[in-house]
Structure formats: C-alpha cells, structure tokens
Amino acid sequence: MIRSAFDAAAIRDAVEVLAAGGLVAMPTETVYGLAADACSGEAVARIYAAKGRPRFNPLIAHVADLAAAEKLAMFDPLSRRLAEAFWPGPLTLVLSKRSDTGLSDLATAGLDTVAVRVPAHPAAQALLRAFEGPLAAPSANRSGHVSPTTAAHVEADLGDVVPIILDAGPSAVGVESTILCIVDGTVHLLRAGGLAREAIEALAGRPVIIAGLDDPEAPVAPGQLASHYAPSAPVRLDVADVRPGEALIAFGLRLPHGAEEAVAIINLSPRGDLVEAAAGLFAALRQLDGKASAIAVSPIPNEGLGEAIRDRLARAAAPRPED
Ligand code: TXA
Ligand code: MG
C-alpha cells in the first residue's frame, strides 16, 4: 500500500514491518529503495526473492550518519574526508567491514568489505532513525528493470510483494549513488552516479580512476551487470537521425534529424541541464517503453551527471542476457 512518507504513523508501521523481517519501499534522494533489516538473513533473502535477482549481489547498508557507519566499517583517512564532505548524500563508500557488525552475510554476499551510504532524504533519515539499525536497500524494481523514481513505479513492479511503499514524490537526483572504493589512497569509481566525478576529484585532490578500465586487479562492484536498467524496447545512443517507429529522448534545444517523425518525444532538459536530465531519466524510459519499436537518444555530454546518465543508457542499450 502506498502511504505518505511524511505521516508519522506510516513511519511507525514501516518500522514494525522491518522489525518483523518484512520489506518497506523507502524514498531516497537518488531512487526508491527496497529496504530490509540488514542484520537479518531472512529479511535480506526476501529482498532477493521480491526483486527476482539472478544471484546474490552484495547490497548497500544504509545508515543515518557517519557515527553509525563507523560501527560497520573501517574508514581510511580519505574515505573519512569524503564521508564528511558528501554525507548525507548520493555517495556510497566500499570499506573494510568490521568483524562484529551483526550484518547478515547475505547482505554483504560474504565479502570482507561493505558498501555504506548515508542518504540525505528526510524520509529515509526518519525511517533509519526510527528503526535504529542498518537497512539493506537495492533499488525497488524487479531485477533488470529501470530503477523507480516515484512510488507509482515501485507499485507497478513490486506492489504485490511490498506491504508499505512510503511516498515522498519524485526522487530529486534520479540516478543511483556514486560508488567509490579507496585502495592505498587511490580513488576507484565503481559506479558513476548522483555525485559528479568532478566534485570528488576537487575534494580528494587526485584523479578518480574508472574501475576495470586499465587494471584488472582494481576493485569492481559485482552488481554492475552489463545489461541493466533495461526497458523492453531497444535503445540507440548518440543518434543523429530518428528512424521511423522510434521514440526520442532528447537533450537540449537541438533535435536530431527526423525528430518530427518520432512516435513520442521526451526532452530530458531543453535548457541542457544535466542535473535536471538525471532526475527525469528513468521516468522517461518507463514512459516510452512499449510505445515505440525502439528508443533513440540524443547525444548527452560526458561530464558532471552526464557520466551517470550515459552509463545507465549504455546499460539499457547493451545486449540482453539470454535468461
Ligand atoms: O542510490 C543508491 O545507491 C540506491 C538507493 C536505494 O540507495 N541503491 C542501489 O543499490 O542502487 P543496488 O543494490 O541497486 O546497487 C548496489 C551496488 C551493486 O552494483 C553492488 O554490486 C555494489 O553496490 N556493491 C555492494 N556491496 C559492494 C561491495 N562490498 N563491494 C563492491 N561493490 C558492492
Ligand atoms: Mg539497482
């Protein structure tokens, strides 16, 4: 059932569901999450079952603040500086796990690292503070689907298996958190996301290395399957021309040739603002899916949040796994 995230009774009921090992859909500033008690294997198993995840990817542990994060993980000096600068917010840090955390091995997929995030959204903060423990929360969509940025998206995918969907309106950021792992002072980008690389580099005073590009030994995020965020219609990137039967996702005022023939057009940001474009991306993919033979996408600059937008679109465009 969809309930207002700003209703104190709804938060109380959500905490009761979580304490009993159940699932709650939680708004965050990035996307809606499917939350469960990160310390209960049974509760975490329900997440995988609900999403239909093909395998047990490690999940992000969400906590209310840095002090709660320090109970789960060890912070090297640079990770602590990043946390102090960007938490609460759309940043996830992969850190060495402490031994006595109580976290379920299913939540961390048995790794000796843990991904931790302090969300900024007031509803997520209210839920975490009322629950008084870490919440494991992947995006609240069925596996392989586009991440949800509204309560209605969650209901469409998971309405039959989630008893409470906390509604706080559209997610402000619209793409998932940026995931970093610091190894010996080097900043590895495991997933481009809602915190732009330029902001991280400015704070860290060093370049951010894109995981897996040059160094096969570099840390990676196991959940970054090539095809992900996939609408059922094929997606074509960086188009100069719109083909007959295609829908168009546009960016900026210059439209590709043939745009007037598109079966539908959604402009992510006519004024060319990448932050506005990220916020509307997943809703646009959902809205156009099923309306066209394919989705054509205008060129989007590879800077700021454009990096995360292009990453998600490239995954949507990637060949689908057979299963
Ligand atoms: O914005 C977000 O991060 C959203 C909201 C709900 O907070 N959550 C989210 O979770 O995107 P999920 O489960 O869809 O993505 C988590 C990613 C996966 O790619 C997973 O492989 C990676 O984090 N991850 C988790 N633990 C890790 C670890 N110990 N080492 C490396 N990667 C890890
Ligand atoms: Mg996801």
Image (tube, grey):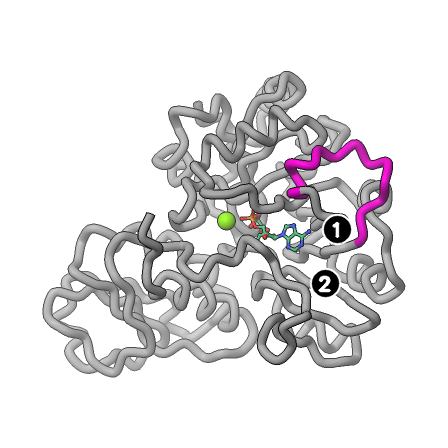
Q: Is residue 101 left or right of residue 1?
A: right
Residue 278 higher or lower than 69, as above or below? below
Query: What is the x, y in percent for residue 72?
Result: 81, 42
Label 1 or label 2, whichever lies nearer to me, is 1
Q: Is mark 2 within 8 Å of ligand 1?
A: yes
Dot 2, crowdedness within 10 Å: few (<14), some or many (≥20)? Answer: many
Q: Where is residue 249, by image quadrant? A: bottom left
Q: Nearer the viewer, residue 301 or 171?
A: 301
Residue at 36% across, 78% down = 299
Identify the residue position indicated by label 2 in the image. Answer: 181
Residue 139 higher or lower than 199, as above or below? above
Element on which disc 1 rests: strand
Residue at 51% across, 29% down = 4
Per the model, the C-alpha gap separating discs 1 and 2 is: 10 Å
Identify the residue position indicated by label 1 in the image. Answer: 113
Q: Amino acid at mark 2?
A: Cys
Q: Nearer the viewer, residue 237 or 170?
A: 237
Query: What is the x, y in percent for residue 309?
Result: 46, 66
- Image: magenta residue range: 96-109
Q: Where is residue 196, by image quadrant? A: bottom right
